Image: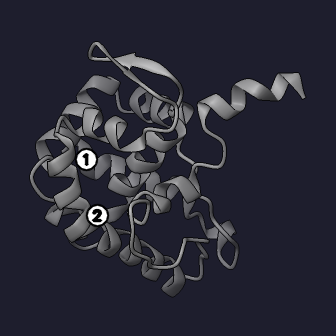
Amino acid sequence: MIYLIFNQYIKNYFFQAENIGSYVVLSVDKQVIDEFCKENSISEKQLKEEFQRLFSENWNFALKSENFFGLAAVQVYVAHSMTEELINGYYISKSNYRDRLCNFLNINNDQLGRLFDYYQDKLWHQLANWANINHFYLNLPELSFGPWSKVRYPLSQALLNQNDLSYLPNL
């Protein structure tokens, strides 16, 4: 199963023994995804299809026994990918994280809202608890309520998104 290989890859990539006792930023960008795909002889499309198959209706699989690394990583990847673009014939602004994740999972905003409401806090808190028990530290936002409460986790790990990076040469 592609997801389990990806999940283990993310775990090994970010949570290495030499990082024990340190802060870890789960900054997943296109390079991380491309390296995974190349090492495992799969396309990004195949990876995306695996996520759509597993996570379009519920995220129970990600909450089982350390299966949360991959879904958290893809959420960060989507946050990192935020730039103005045309997706499926619709203009998506650089700040529209929810539509990007919906596109990645091939679901609508209502479905994502239900998934976020039921699973998002659990997913990220399981990751944070695992990291803490294993002496890694993630700087995640506190639990909160409101319109941005569910997207704050991946956005907090993305560091700079594609749009932000485009401004760096001008500094």
Q: Please indicate, yes or no, whether residue 44 appears anywhere in the rendered image.
A: yes
Q: How many marks?
A: 2
* Residue 117 image-quadrant placement: bottom left
Q: Quadrant of the C terminus?
A: top right
**Of 34 and 85, the residue lying toward us:** 85
Using residue 53 as the reference point, say whether residue 139 is left or right of it: right
Outermost residue, bottom direction? 133
From the viewer's side, name the closer residue of 66 and 115. Answer: 115
Q: Is 122 placed above or below 6 here? A: below
Residue farthest to the right, as pictured: 171
- Is residue 117 depicted above or below 32 in this figure? below
State the CA–CA distance, disc 1 to disc 2: 9 Å
Q: What amino acid is at disc 2? A: Asn
- Above or below 100: residue 170: above
Q: Are marks 1 and 2 in contact (CB under 8 Å)?
A: yes
How many residues crowd mark 1 within 10 Å: few (<14), some (14–19), many (20+)? some
- Residue 168 picture quarter: top right
The circle drawn on residue 67 is: 2
In the image: residue 26, left or right of residue 115: right
- Tag on residue 21? none
Residue type of the residue flagged with mark 1: Tyr
| Local SS, label 1 | helix
Q: Residue 149 at x, y = what percent?
A: 42, 66
Residue at left offset 49%, top offset 61%:
152
For label 1, the residue is: 3
Asked which colour scheme the image uses, the reply is one colour
Q: Residue at x 35, y 44 (%)?
A: 98
Q: Give the answer, above or below, for where 78 lies relative to 146.
A: above
Query: Residue drawn 14% across and 50% down?
Result: 111
